[in-house]
């Protein structure tokens, strides 16, 4: 029996590769140019992925800047709590 493709993504904090379904997506809010949590994965454009346990440790680093192609200006205030939504 043939199985389907499993997308693999890398956590922005710990750099561990995991299947996409085990990670939380963070995306760039176009209005504020800040990084917000996108739990429903409905925000268009650039995004990154973070382990749920690493989300409180997410900080605005070079790795985060690179993931958003230097367009992000910072993190939304509630991103560390995992509740930031667009």
Image: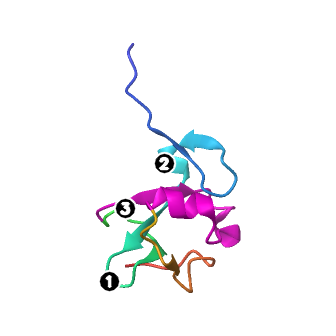
Residue 38 figure quarter: bottom left
**Circle 1: element type:** loop
| In contact (CB < 8 Å): disc 2 and disc 1 | no
**Which residue position holds label 2?**
21
Image quarter for residue 30? bottom left
Q: Residue furthest top?
A: 1
> What is the secondary structure assignment of the residue under circle 3?
loop
Residues under numbered marks 3 and 2 in contact, where contact means CB atoms less than 8 Å apart: no
Q: Is residue 66 left or right of residue 52?
A: left
Residue 21 placement (x, y as % from top left): 48, 48
State the image coordinates of residue 11 (x, y, percent, origin top left): 60, 52
In the foreground, 53 or 34: 34
Give the residues drawn in magenta, as a range.
44-69
Q: Residue at x 37, y 61 (%)?
A: 41
Asked if residue 55 lies in the magenta stretch, the reply is: yes
Q: Earlier in the sequence, mark 3 or mark 1?
A: 1
In the image, taking residue 30 as reference, residue 27 lies left or right, namely: right
Residue depth check, mark 3 versus mark 1: number of the one nearer the observer:
1
Q: Residues within 10 Å of mark 1 (few under 14, many from 20)?
A: few
Gap in Å between the C-alphas at discs 2 and 1? Answer: 27 Å
First in sequence: mark 3 vs mark 2: 2
User: Can you give x and y, in whole percent of width and height, for residue 31 in the image?
Assistant: 32, 83
Q: Which residue is mark 3?
A: 41
Judge depth for marks 2 and 1 and give the one in front: 1
Q: Quadrant of the C terminus?
A: bottom left
**The N terminus: image quadrant:** top left
71 above or below 48? below
Q: Position of residue 53 (x, y in %)?
A: 69, 61
**Which one is in front, 42 or 13?**
13
- Residue annotated with mark 1: 31
Front residue of 56/72: it is 72
């Amino acid at each position: 029996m043939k199985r389907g493709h499993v997308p693999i993504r890398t956590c922005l904090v710990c750099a561990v590769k995991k299947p996409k379904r085990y990670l939380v997506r963070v995306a760039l809010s176009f209005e504020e140019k800040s990084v917000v949590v996108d739990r429903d994965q409905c925000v268009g454009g650039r995004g990154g992925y973070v382990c749920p346990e690493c989300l409180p440790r997410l900080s605005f680093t070079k790795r985060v800047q690179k993931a958003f192609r230097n367009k992000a200006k910072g993190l939304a205030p509630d991103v560390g709590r995992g509740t930031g939504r667009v």
